[in-house]
Image (cartoon, rainbow, N blue to C red):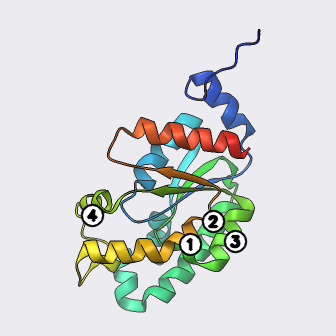
């Protein structure tokens, strides 16, 4: 009887990583854990982790709140689309890319990710999102209103876009290991 490695052991993860020929793109609401889970996922797979928001700030030489203030959301989304396209085409096959919360709502960006990447929708309940986003005050869309109301509205508006991702994982307040295992299992099934 042949021994098959579990997706969570080193040999199983290495075998899975060897089969991945495109970038893994994490999509979902702000505060869902795209960056923290993305770093851990990339480390497990031996891939490079890239946060699209960090790359946007480098390219613009401004913070995201500064971009929003100076140029507005439409300008930001256009830059975001261009940066994600570059990250995906620039030898991006062995990368995990965390996107901003609204990136996957852009038709061009979503089409590119669905065509050339492995899209993983990370979702959380509103209480978790409110608690996590309260840790930082650098979220332009949460300024000037009740964060719970804004997050609830945005989550509902964005759900039809996020739901197009072929892999969907709930990221709760439990250990990251649970969500990482579900992501790996989802990728295994998708491949």
In the rendering, at what x and y percent does residue 6 appear?
Answer: 61, 24
Element on which disc 4 rests:
helix
Earlier in the chain: of badge 3 and badge 2, it is 3
Is residue 117 visible to the viewer in this orientation of the structure? yes
Residue at (39, 65) in percent of width and height: 30
Q: In this view, does 110 lie to the left or right of 56?
A: right
Element on which disc 1 rests:
helix
Please, which residue is most extreme toward the right here? 1
Q: Which residue lies under the disc numbered 1?
A: 160
Which dot, 3 or 4, sits closer to the camera? 4
- Classify 10 Å Cα crowding around label 3: few (below 14), some (14-19), many (20 and above): some
Earlier in the chain: of badge 3 and badge 4, it is 3
Residue at (46, 69) in percent of width and height: 101
In the rendering, at what x and y percent does residue 141 appear?
Answer: 34, 79
Q: Which residue lies under the disc numbered 2?
A: 164
Earlier in the chain: of badge 2 and badge 4, it is 4
Q: In this view, does 125 lie to the left or right of 18?
A: left
Q: Distance between the residues labelled 2 and 1?
A: 7 Å
Q: Is residue 54 above or below residue 189?
A: below
Q: Which residue lies under the disc numbered 4?
A: 130
> Mark on residue 111?
3
Element on which disc 2 rests:
loop
């Amino acid at each position: 009887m042949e021994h098959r490695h579990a997706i969570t052991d080193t040999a199983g993860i290495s075998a899975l990583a060897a089969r991945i020929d495109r970038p893994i793109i994490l999509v979902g609401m702000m505060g869902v854990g795209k960056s923290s889970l993305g770093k851990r996922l990339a480390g497990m797979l031996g891939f490079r982790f890239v946060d699209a928001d960090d790359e946007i700030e480098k390219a613009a030489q401004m913070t995201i709140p500064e971009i929003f203030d100076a140029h507005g959301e439409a300008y930001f989304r256009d830059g975001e689309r261009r940066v994600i396209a570059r990250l995906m085409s620039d030898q991006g096959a062995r990368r995990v890319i965390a996107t901003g919360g609204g990136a996957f709502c852009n038709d061009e960006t979503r089409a590119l990710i669905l065509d050339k990447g492995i899209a993983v929708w990370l979702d959380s309940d509103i209480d978790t999102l409110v608690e996590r986003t309260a840790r930082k005050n650098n979220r332009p869309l949460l300024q000037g209103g009740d964060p719970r109301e804004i997050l609830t509205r945005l989550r509902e508006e964005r759900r039809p876009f996020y739901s197009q991702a072929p892999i969907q994982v709930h990221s709760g307040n439990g250990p990251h290991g649970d969500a990482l295992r579900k992501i790996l299992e989802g990728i295994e099934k998708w491949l």
